[in-house]
């Protein structure tokens, strides 16, 4: 079908495609290679230019088999330690690029150029809909998007968390489809009870799995399948969920994209509180912070003290003339990264500021979402529409979709996300901020719609996400393996990091004066990635032999 469509329409074929894709077509008559990637970037497409040839693949490691060098892109590693992922078009490797989402490329006589073929559109016919009309249209569009993704000639099911996004997707499917969920033995990280309530309410047979206590031992496999430096720890439970799903279903529908499309992250609300916080007299801010640090030396996972610390980080970022949203999204700050880096990283990243990547996306988002609005020079927009638009072009494809696609395809499971339907996305971003996020309650449209179809305990449950108990692991079962790798660091040997770069974070974490689980995970994953892809000290396969990791 693709070939015939290309023959008839050429590049214009892309506007007629739906869903996720990444493909290449060779036009033998014109001797031209055509590459294209889906609008949101669900499916990956890597390419390398060498010796007058263009090589392309769905994984970077496939290009290495063709002779492309595995040379580190220092700037990409700097970006990954900032955002947890490598923003496109970088890949982590010097000679390998990713075709950005919604882009196509033409290659002729060894030269390649690419351009954007798709943009989010927010044109609305008439005025903004009334709340009830907005809810009804949201459900209508979600139902259409879900129905389109039910076509399958292999067993199909649903990935179900304790949240409303995946539950709403299941509610819009016709028939009793099986669902799958996974959770931890720790109650704070486990959403299986909520998933059971949803499944029972919607009469879906549910397969529930417990993530093994030693799931962190899968880190080498996860790093191998991720290809790039990638530091979102939730890829570990996603990897297990896909493995457990495969015997029952080859296609799974998920709720990915619901938070970005309908303002589901607490940080969107937090950005609305920032202006009020910055106007609070300094003496009161300092007293509140002092009390928070005295009462909770290490930040709680979801308490008022955590929000207060978060707001102060954002305020300080804004005071340094950078967009406060950068503070909300960064893993390691610029100061922390400078303390980590060895000579090679410092030299290679001199003059580079990883914060500019997100700030550029936020600027473009502001212009796209609020065209014709005059802005004070040097000011930052913290309106929900700008933040969501930026996330849809950065965090969603770079982190969320990369994680889900790589970990699911590692087991041959295809994950489809109705919330990524372009009609639904265009609709959601066309709504005024006052409809999408009128107050301090995240994704009010979806919650209102969910109240019609889902159990109350699910609709009103606190958002948890697919978190991992990293803080506990690094004070317990992961201590020995982590210390073994840090003590024999290849990153230090290659002058990426300073000698004993990890020690300060480690000691603060072990003493309980800070929660550095996510940062320690990133450093550990960097060491494993370096050994797999750069040092050549591991043997890729069903089991990965990493000296000191206890596998």
Image: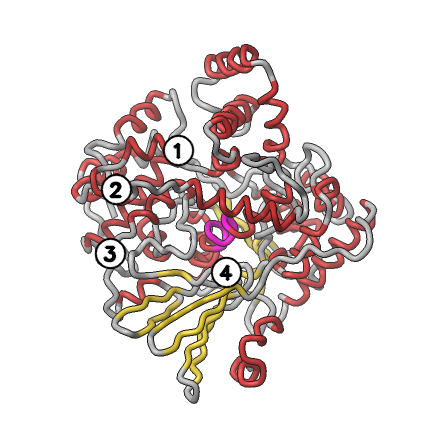
Q: Which of disc 4 and disc 2 is earlier in sequence?
A: 4
CB-based contact (under 8 Å), mark 3 and mark 1: no
Q: Residue at x 63, y 56 (%)?
A: 419
Q: Note whether 335 is above or below 59 in the view shown.
A: above
Please provide percent x and percent y for residue 387: 58, 42
Depth check, front residue: 292 or 29: 29
Q: Earlier in the sequence, mark 4 or mark 1?
A: 4
Q: Residue furthest bottom?
A: 29
For residue 333, which numbered disc appears in the image? Answer: 1
C-alpha span from label 3 to label 1: 25 Å
Residue closest to the eye, 494 or 483: 494
Residue at 71% from the left image edge and 63% from the top image edge:
144
Quarter of the image containing the N terminus? bottom right
Mark 3 sits on what residue? Answer: 71
The residues colored magenta run: 394-401
Q: For the residue labelled by badge 2, is the local secondary structure a helix, a strand or a loop?
A: helix
Q: Is residue 397 magenta?
A: yes
Q: Position of residue 181 (x, y in %)?
A: 54, 50
Q: Earlier in the sequence, mark 3 or mark 4?
A: 3
Query: What secondary structure characterizes most of the magenta part?
Result: helix
In the image, 412 versus 262, the foreground residue is 262
Is 278 left or right of 354, judged from the image as shown?
right
In this rendering, the answer to whether 16 lies above or below 200 is: below
Upstream in the sequence, badge 1 or badge 2? Answer: 1
Q: Could you say whether the residue bearing mark 4 is in a helix, strand or loop?
A: loop
Secondary structure of the residue carrying tag 1 is: loop
Name the residue carrying label 2: 345
- Compute the Cα span from label 3 to label 4: 24 Å
Residue 360 position in % (x across, y down)? 49, 46
State the mark number for residue 101: 4
- Category of crowding for the residue at label 2, using alpha-carbon neighbours closer than 10 angstroms: few (below 14), some (14–19), many (at least 20): many
What residue is drawn where x is 58% and y is 55%?
254
């Amino acid at each position: 079908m693709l070939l015939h469509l290309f023959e008839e329409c050429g590049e214009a074929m892309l506007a007629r495609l739906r869903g996720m894709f990444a493909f290449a077509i060779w036009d033998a008559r014109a001797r031209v290679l055509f590459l294209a990637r889906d609008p949101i970037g669900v499916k990956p497409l890597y390419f390398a230019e060498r010796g007058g040839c263009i090589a392309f693949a769905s994984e970077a490691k496939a290009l290495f088999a063709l002779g492309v060098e595995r040379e580190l892109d220092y700037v990409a590693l700097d970006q990954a330690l900032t955002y947890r992922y490598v923003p496109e078009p970088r890949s982590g490797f010097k000679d390998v690029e990713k075709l950005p989402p919604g882009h196509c490329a033409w290659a002729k006589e060894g030269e390649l150029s690419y351009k954007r073929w798709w943009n989010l559109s927010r044109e609305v016919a008439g005025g903004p809909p009334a709340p009830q009309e907005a809810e009804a249209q949201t459900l209508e569009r979600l139902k259409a998007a879900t129905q389109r993704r039910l076509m399958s000639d292999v067993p199909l099911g649903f990935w179900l968390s304790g949240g409303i996004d995946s539950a709403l997707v299941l509610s819009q499917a016709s028939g009793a489809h099986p669902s799958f969920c996974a959770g931890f033995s720790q109650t704070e990280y486990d959403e299986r009870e909520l998933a059971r309530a949803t499944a029972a309410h919607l009469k879906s047979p549910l397969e529930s799995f417990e993530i093994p206590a030693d799931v962190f031992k899968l880190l080498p496999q996860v790093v191998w399948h991720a290809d790039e430096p990638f530091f979102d720890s939730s890829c570990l439970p996603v990897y297990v969920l896909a493995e457990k799903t495969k015997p029952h279903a080859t296609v799974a529908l998920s709720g990915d994209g619901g938070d970005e499309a309908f303002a589901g992250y607490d940080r969107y609300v937090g950005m609305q509180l920032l202006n009020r916080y910055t106007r609070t007299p300094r003496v009161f801010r300092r007293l509140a912070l002092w009390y928070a640090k005295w009462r909770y030396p290490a930040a709680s996972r979801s308490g008022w003290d955590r929000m207060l610390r978060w707001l102060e980080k954002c305020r300080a970022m804004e005071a340094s003339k950078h967009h406060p949203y950068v503070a909300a999204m960064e893993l390691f700050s610029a100061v922390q990264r400078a303390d980590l880096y060895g000579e090679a990283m410092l030299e290679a990243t001199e003059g580079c500021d990883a914060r500019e990547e997100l700030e550029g996306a936020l600027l473009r988002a502001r212009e796209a979402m609020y065209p014709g609005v005059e802005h004070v020079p040097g000011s930052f927009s913290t309106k929900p529409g700008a933040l969501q638009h930026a996330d849809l072009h950065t965090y969603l494809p770079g982190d969320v979709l990369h994680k889900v696609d790589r970990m699911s395809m590692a087991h041959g499971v295809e994950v489809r996300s109705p919330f990524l339907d372009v009609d639904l996305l265009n609709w959601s971003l066309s709504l005024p901020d006052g409809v999408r996020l009128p107050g301090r309650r995240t994704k009010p449209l979806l919650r209102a719609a969910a109240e019609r179809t889902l159990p109350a305990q699910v609709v009103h449950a606190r958002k948890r996400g697919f978190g991992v108990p990293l803080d506990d692991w690094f004070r317990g079962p992961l201590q020995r393996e982590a210390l073994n790798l840090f003590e024999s660091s290849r990153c230090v040997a290659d002058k990426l990091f300073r000698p004993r770069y990890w020690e300060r974070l480690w000691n603060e974490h072990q003493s309980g004066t800070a929660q550095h689980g996510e940062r320690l995970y990133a450093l550990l994953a960097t060491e494993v990635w370096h050994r797999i892809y750069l040092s050549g000290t591991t043997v890729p396969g069903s089991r990965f032999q990493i000296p000191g990791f206890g596998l």
